[in-house]
Image: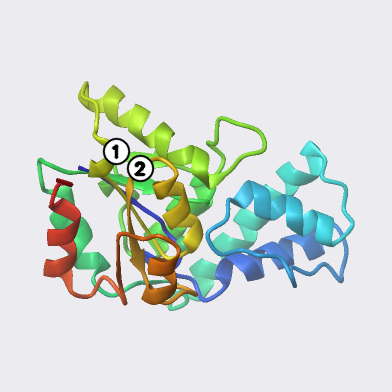
Amino acid sequence: MLLLFDIDGTLLITRRGGIIAMELAGRELFRPDFTVEGVEFAGRLDPLISIDVLKRNSVAQTAEHLNAFRDGYRRYLMHLLTHETDRTQALPGVHGIIPTLAKRSDVVLGLLTGNWPETGKFKLRSAGIDPDMFPLAVWGDESPHHPPAREHLPPVAMHRYTQRTGRQVARGNVVVIGDTPHDVHCAKAHGCRALGVGTGLFTPEQLMNAGADHAVASLADEEAVVKWLTTPAE
Ligand SMILES: [Mg+2]
């Protein structure tokens, strides 16, 4: 089994820490009234969010601006999450199921996330989750196509699985675990399974309607979640 976990709203929450950090970075770098209002964040890739955020503020989306924004976001996020230590929290069940799954020989644990690697790993560490428990990770800037999309990421994960193990993984034995319809769609686009988790902005019912194979209110029922995740597709 290849299990691919989303980060925000699935493994942890930062109480809008990412959004606040982007706004502060934009105010420092570009204009004092820089705002992220009206930009969609949940389940999207950081490189796409930053293009939209610069557009929203009439800032040219040059490579120079985008690189400066990525770095400014990293600085403000690290400052915020370091100084407000209770802002980031692992969601219920996460501290139980991740170590349990990491020990199993029939599971490769992975991340499939819209986060850039430097900020994604920092969020995980801030929530007390060791990023090294996930030997396989596909980050928000690793889409091999233009324009980038979350739908491009599962094949990257499957390719890395084969590189690691020397084996192919059946699509039905790849599970994307996430809190938004974007997570569900990226799995279903490739015949993978999707577990919806209702700890973000969407309810389990909304995630089922988006096409999830199964949805739970949270990962708190550790035994049931581990069982569903580790039962191979027929
Ligand atoms: Mg998410």
Q: Which residue is mark 1?
A: 171
- Of residue 38 and residue 231, the one placed in the foreground of this image is 231
Q: Position of residue 224 (x, y in %)?
A: 14, 68
Would you call the spot at circle 2 few (<14 residues within 10 Å), some (14-19), or many (20 or more)?
some
Q: Which mark is residue 60?
A: none
Q: Are marks 2 and 1 in contact (CB under 8 Å)?
A: yes
Gap between marks 2 and 1, in whole Å?
6 Å
Q: Residue at x 80, y 65 (%)?
A: 27
- Amino acid marked by disc 1: Arg
Q: Position of residue 74 (x, y in %)?
A: 60, 54
Would you call the spot at circle 1 few (<14 residues within 10 Å), some (14-19), or many (20 or more)?
some
- Of residue 14 and residue 193, the one placed in the foreground of this image is 193
Locate the C terminus by quadrant.
Answer: top left
The answer to whether residue 227 is left or right of residue 134 is left
Q: Quadrant of residue 72?
A: bottom right
The answer to whether residue 148 is left or right of residue 61 is left
Q: Residue at x 37, y 36 (%)?
A: 157
- Amino acid marked by disc 2: Gly
Q: Quadrant of residue 77?
A: bottom right
Q: Which residue is mark 2?
A: 191
> Vertical placement of 147 versus 193: above or below?
above
> Vertical placement of 169 versus 49: above or below?
above
Q: Residue at x 38, y 67 (%)?
A: 208
Of label 2 and label 1, which has the lower sequence position? 1
Q: Residue at x 11, y 68 (%)?
A: 223
Q: Position of residue 231 (x, y in %)?
A: 13, 52
Locate the N terminus by quadrant.
Answer: top left
Q: Position of residue 118 (x, y in %)?
A: 51, 47
Query: Label 2 CB, ligand 1: below 8 Å?
Result: no
